[in-house]
Image (cartoon, helix red, strand yellow):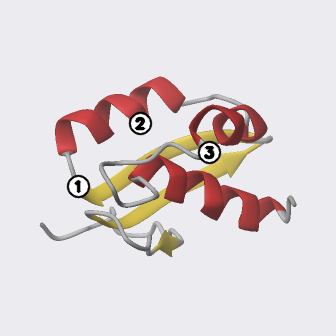
């Protein structure tokens, strides 16, 4: 699956590690998560997660999804999102 953005929009694309998703993109507006998109992975589940997390404060997203694992991977697409968000916010 190819990840395309509308012409004129530039997004940061983050590459998760150890999961099926190949890329994660999002915006942070006024401390809230917006326009979350996963490329690859379990699209039904990740699309639902994107809708559920839309507009949620970033700190709340991190606290809800940090540490969730997928199978025996020790991480998950949502855990990778939390780790990326923590780096974006420079949280410990």
Ranked by sequence position, the earlier of labels 3 and 1 is 1
Check disc 2 and report the residue beneath it: 50
Circle 1 SS class:
loop
Circle 3 crowding by C-alpha within 10 Å: few under 14, some 14–19, many from 20: some
The location of residue 67, given as percent across then percent down, is: 58, 46
Determine the residue located farthest toward the front in the rendered image. 72
User: Is 57 or 75 nearer to us in this picture?
Assistant: 75
Asked where in the image residue 5 lies, by quadrant, the reply is: bottom left
Q: Position of residue 9 (x, y in %)?
A: 46, 66
Q: Name the one closer to the observer, 1 or 83.
A: 83
**In this image, 69 relative to 67: left or right?**
left
Mark 2 residue element? helix
Q: Does residue 31 lie above or below 3 as drawn?
A: above
Residue holding disc 3: 66
Q: Nearer the viewer, mark 1 or mark 2?
A: 1
Q: Earlier in the sequence, mark 2 or mark 3?
A: 2
Q: Residues within 10 Å of mark 1 (few under 14, many from 20)?
A: some
Q: Is residue 90 left or right of residue 43?
A: right
Residue under circle 1? 41
80 over 58 or under it: above or below: below
Q: Which label's residue is closer to the chain start, 1 or 2?
A: 1
Image-quadrant location for residue 7: bottom left
């Amino acid at each position: 699956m190819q990840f395309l953005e509308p012409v004129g929009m530039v997004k940061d694309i983050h590459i998760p590690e150890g999961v099926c998703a190949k890329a994660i993109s999002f915006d942070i507006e006024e401390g809230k998560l917006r326009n979350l998109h996963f490329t690859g992975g379990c699209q039904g589940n990740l699309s639902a997660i994107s809708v559920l997390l839309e507009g949620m404060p970033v700190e709340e997203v991190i606290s809800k999804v940090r540490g969730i694992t997928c199978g025996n991977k020790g991480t998950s697409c949502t855990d990778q999102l939390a780790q990326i968000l923590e780096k974006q916010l420079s949280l410990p």
